[in-house]
């Protein structure tokens, strides 16, 4: 939610800031803006509602803003509707201080009242403008001191970047509960919400922790507590390949990321294979795994859906109770935790506020915490007792695809490791699951070869306005993700139901022509789901079934159209079946002319509650 970036050095800041914002636009795209300290000792601010392209146009790709230090912002609106006034940077009334902010300042109302009583006049509805005025209020010739005083009073979540008309070349950045990194260059330095914004300039970064402040100048970066004690921060080398964050010739990031899945899954699984076994002992001690009596999987959105799949798979294969809880609920539901509980937090970004807070709650409750995260050094990765990195590489499209697939693969690795360590899985099952896990990349490639068929189906159905997904067991778990993918990028109303539950209400919504996508890959229940498909067909629905090669014949009679995936062990079915659902959502959105990579109202990294 919102991306911030800062540059100070010898080059023109505006074009560099715009490039950084390009990379951060996935975090929000309601508006964007820049503030650059000009050679005339003034701050020059340009902001524009809408996509970054509107800002680029307004400032002639940065040429309109001369200066070698500045800050930039791309917004996902929280306080105040998307508009030019509510866009960042926000500037103190006298034009001395400009600030960009990601997060929510919860106590902005009393602070605003205090400042208004002292004669400050506000130009926007945002919480952020309060911070600009507050810093200016404390400014007595030392920007660091003013920011430190201000952050001591701010409550809520923030990553802020500040530039001051009176301090050439100096930027001050601070963080609490929102991500912030500093990047080191030669005679120039940066800060940003995410390494992708800086990867083309530097690989050397420091991750700020909560309640830390950075003073960034062209030839130095220093760190402080809010009480101005200087602190030393470790420098880290990031190994992300920036080309992975480009579209690579494809029209959309989402399509490119769908195509990258075979390789992403292979990269994720490989580091954990030792002597033909799934070995996660580096991450989870075998002794701990043996004594666990309950698992929680806690996450949001698609990552939550991975948890739902894992519940079915792990309970079946490992016979351990698994509870899957939405992170926003887990925090407030007094979960039952102790030293024999493992809480697994799944997050692509590693920054989702609800998941991060749930993780802290789990730790405070005495549970052991494991995070499954795609972004190295992210907050959730650092906060958990152990971390497993998915190796999806940068995922830019808001709708997740390859991160979801790599998370699923990690859950299968965990299933194998738990099964072996706890003696819960016979050798035959273990071998079958491992063999099929290793075969996933090739089988995904086979599905991709047939994408024209899925494109044809999307062409046939793209005018439907209501689409239901049904399935049982892991097919139901996957339905949740299929439905989410479709609605988030194509804006078609869609819901997923456990097939057996459909007739307890939802079937009343089925009318002539309603499309029902029946996932029927789970052999044990294939006839039951096929019967449910027949029930909706009897009421006028058109049924598109997704099934496996060897189940095809048992499903055909209940379907108008069929997508067939390769056979595999049941623990891997969602890993394959998700791919046609992603492609279907993609092509549906394409035919409907939607903004696929940046669907309305959404953001990829949700750092507010
Ligand atoms: C947002 C994204 C979803 C994502 C969810 C959780 O809502 O739009 O695609 O699944 O956040 O994100 P995380 O980074 O924690 O996996």
Image (cartoon, helix red, strand yellow):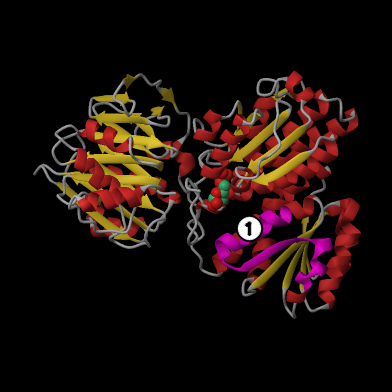
Magenta run includes residue 20: no
Residue 432: x and y in percent read 85, 35
In this rendering, position of residue 144 left or right of residue 266: left
In this rendering, position of residue 108 left or right of residue 331: left
Using the rendered image of the protein, determine whether residue 306 is visible from the camera's viewpoint. Answer: yes
Q: Main secondary structure of the magenta part?
A: helix
Using the rendered image of the protein, determine whether residue 277 is visible from the camera's viewpoint. Answer: no
Point out the stretch of residues depicted in magenta.
478-507
Label 1: few (<14), some or many (≥20) within 10 Å? many
The residue that mark 1 highlights is 484
Q: Quadrant of residue 30?
A: bottom left
Classify mark 1: helix, strand or loop.
Answer: helix
Residue at 67% in and 54% down = 481
Residue 554: x and y in percent read 90, 60
> Which residue is nearer to you in this view: 362 or 5?
362
Question: On screen, 46 above or below 14?
Answer: below
């Amino acid at each position: 939610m919102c991306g911030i970036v800062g540059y100070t050095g010898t080059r023109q800041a505006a074009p560099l800031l715009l490039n950084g914002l390009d990379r951060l636009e996935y975090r929000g795209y309601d508006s964007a803006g820049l503030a650059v300290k000009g050679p005339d000792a003034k701050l020059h601010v340009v902001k524009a509602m809408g996509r970054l392209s509107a800002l680029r146009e307004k400032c002639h790709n940065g040429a309109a803003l001369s200066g070698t230090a500045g800050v930039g912002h791309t917004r996902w609106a929280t306080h105040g509707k998307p508009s030019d006034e509510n866009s960042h940077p926000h500037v103190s009334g006298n034009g001395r201080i400009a600030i960009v902010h990601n997060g929510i300042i919860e106590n902005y109302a009393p602070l605003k009242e205090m400042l208004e009583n002292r004669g400050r006049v506000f130009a926007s509805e945002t919480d952020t403008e309060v911070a600009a005025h507050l810093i200016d209020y404390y400014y007595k010739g030392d920007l660091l001191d003013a920011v430190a005083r201000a952050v001591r009073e701010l409550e809520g979540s923030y990553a802020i970047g500040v530039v001051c008309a009176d301090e050439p070349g100096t930027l001050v950045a601070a963080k609490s509960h929102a991500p912030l990194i500093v990047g080191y260059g030669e005679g120039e330095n940066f800060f940003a919400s995410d390494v992708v914004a800086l990867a083309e300039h530097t690989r050397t970064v420091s991750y700020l922790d909560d309640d830390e402040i950075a003073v960034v100048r062209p030839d130095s970066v220093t760190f402080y507590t809010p009480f101005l004690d200087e602190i030393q921060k470790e420098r880290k080398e990031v190994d992300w390949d920036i080309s992975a964050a480009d579209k690579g010739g494809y029209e959309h990031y989402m399509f490119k990321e769908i195509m990258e899945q075979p390789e992403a899954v292979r990269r994720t699984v490989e580091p954990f294979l030792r002597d033909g076994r799934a070995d996660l002992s580096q991450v989870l001690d075998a002794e701990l795994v043996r004594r666990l009596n309950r698992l929680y999987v806690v996450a949001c959105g698609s990552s939550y859906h991975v948890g739902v799949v894992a519940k079915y798979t792990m309970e079946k294969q490992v016979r351990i109770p698994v509870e899957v809880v939405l992170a926003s609920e887990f925090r407030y539901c007094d979960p039952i935790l102790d030293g024999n509980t493992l809480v697994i937090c799944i997050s692509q970004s590693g920054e989702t506020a609800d998941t991060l807070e749930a993780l802290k709650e789990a730790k405070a409750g005495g549970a052991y915490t494991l995070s499954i995260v795609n972004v190295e050094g992210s907050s959730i990765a650092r906060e958990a007792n152990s971390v497993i990195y998915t190796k999806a590489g940068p995922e830019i499209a808001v709708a997740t695809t390859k991160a979801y697939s790599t998370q699923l693969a990690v859950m299968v690795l965990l299933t194998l490791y738990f099964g072996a360590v706890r003696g819960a899985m016979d050798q035959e099952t273990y071998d079958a699951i491992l063999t099929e896990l290793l075969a996933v990349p090739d089988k995904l490639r086979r599905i991709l070869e047939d994408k024209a068929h899925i494109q044809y189906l999307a062409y046939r159905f793209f005018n439907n306005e209501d689409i239901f997904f049904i399935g049982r067991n892991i097919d139901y778990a996957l339905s949740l993700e299929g439905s989410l993918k479709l609605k988030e990028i194509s804006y078609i109303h869609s819901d997923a139901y456990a097939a057996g539950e459909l007739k307890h209400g939802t079937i009343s919504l089925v009318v002539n022509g309603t499309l029902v996508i029946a996932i029927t890959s789970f052999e044990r229940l294939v006839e039951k789901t096929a019967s449910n498909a027949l029930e909706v067909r009897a009421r006028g629905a058109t049924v598109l079934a997704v099934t496996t090669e060897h189940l095809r014949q048992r499903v055909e009679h209940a379907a108008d159209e069929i997508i067939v995936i390769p056979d595999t062990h049941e623990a891997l079915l969602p890993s394959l079946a998700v791919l046609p659902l992603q492609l279907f959502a993609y092509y549906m959105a394409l035919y409907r002319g939607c903004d696929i990579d940046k669907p309305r109202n959404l953001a990829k990294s949700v750092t507010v509650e």
